[in-house]
Amino acid sequence: MNANDIKNKQVNELVTEVKMFFAFSNEQFIKNKTPLKDGDKYLSIGAGGYMPKSNLNAFNTGMKKIQATFKKAMQDQKARKAHIAYELNNHEAYYTNNIESTLDALGSDFTSQEVLNVFDGRRKLTA
């Protein structure tokens, strides 16, 4: 299992733990909502996500832990290149011949040069 798979698994477990759900209409909200404790309210986290407000601290703490673990995994060059390749594919860089959205998704921990190196190397493999 690679670092992306591990991160996704951890995020999915956290989403379940904090009883997060997604809804893009009132109908979906009613269908997907999780039970609330007495006196609790739903909190919108954006992008259609909701969760009980009482779980916000657990969510923030969990995400910080996941990010720290992932950042540590990204110190390994093989894992780093695999993550760059994952994001290049995810943002269809090979179809658009553009890495800008990939760079945005990766954030400031990754340089444009290292992304270009993976992009160019993988493109040559498929040519």
Image: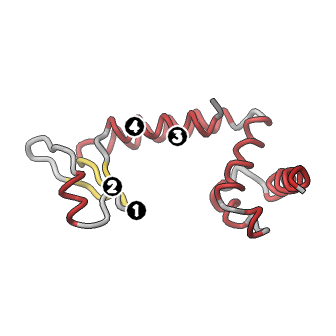
Q: Are marks 1 and 2 in contact (CB under 8 Å)?
A: yes
Residue appearing at x 28%, y 42% in the figure: 19
Look at the picture and state if 40 lies above or below 76.
Answer: below
Which is more N-terminal, label 3 or label 4?
Answer: 3
Q: Residue at x 74, y 66 (%)?
A: 95
Q: Considering depth in this image, is 116 or 1 the residue closer to the camera? A: 1
Q: Nearer the viewer, residue 52 or 64?
A: 52
Secondary structure beneath label 3: helix
Side (left or right) of 9 relative to 96: left
Say what secondary structure mark 2 lies in: strand
Q: Which mark is residue 14?
A: 4
Give the mark toward the camera: 2 or 4: 2
User: In the drawing, what numbered circle is on residue 22?
Assistant: 2
Question: How many discs appear?
Answer: 4
Q: In the rendered structure, are the residues bearing label 2 and label 3 in contact, judged by CB atoms less than 8 Å apart?
A: no
Determine the residue located farthest toward the top in the rendered image.
1
Disc 4 residue type (three-letter): Leu
SS class, disc 1:
loop
Q: Earlier in the sequence, mark 3 or mark 1?
A: 3
Q: Amino acid at mark 1?
A: Ala
Measure how far apart labels 4 and 1 are at the Cα level.
17 Å
Q: Position of residue 34 (x, y in %)?
A: 21, 45
Residue to which mark 3 is pinned: 8
C-beta proximity under 8 Å, tags 4 and 1: no
Q: How far apart are the two marked residues, 2 and 4, measured between alpha carbons?
A: 14 Å
Counting other residues with Cα less than 10 Å from the Cα at mark 1, is it few (<14), some (14-19), or many (20 or more)? few
* Callout 4–callout 3 Cβ contact below 8 Å: no
Question: Mark 4 and mark 3: span between their CA atoms?
Answer: 10 Å
Q: Earlier in the sequence, mark 4 or mark 1?
A: 4
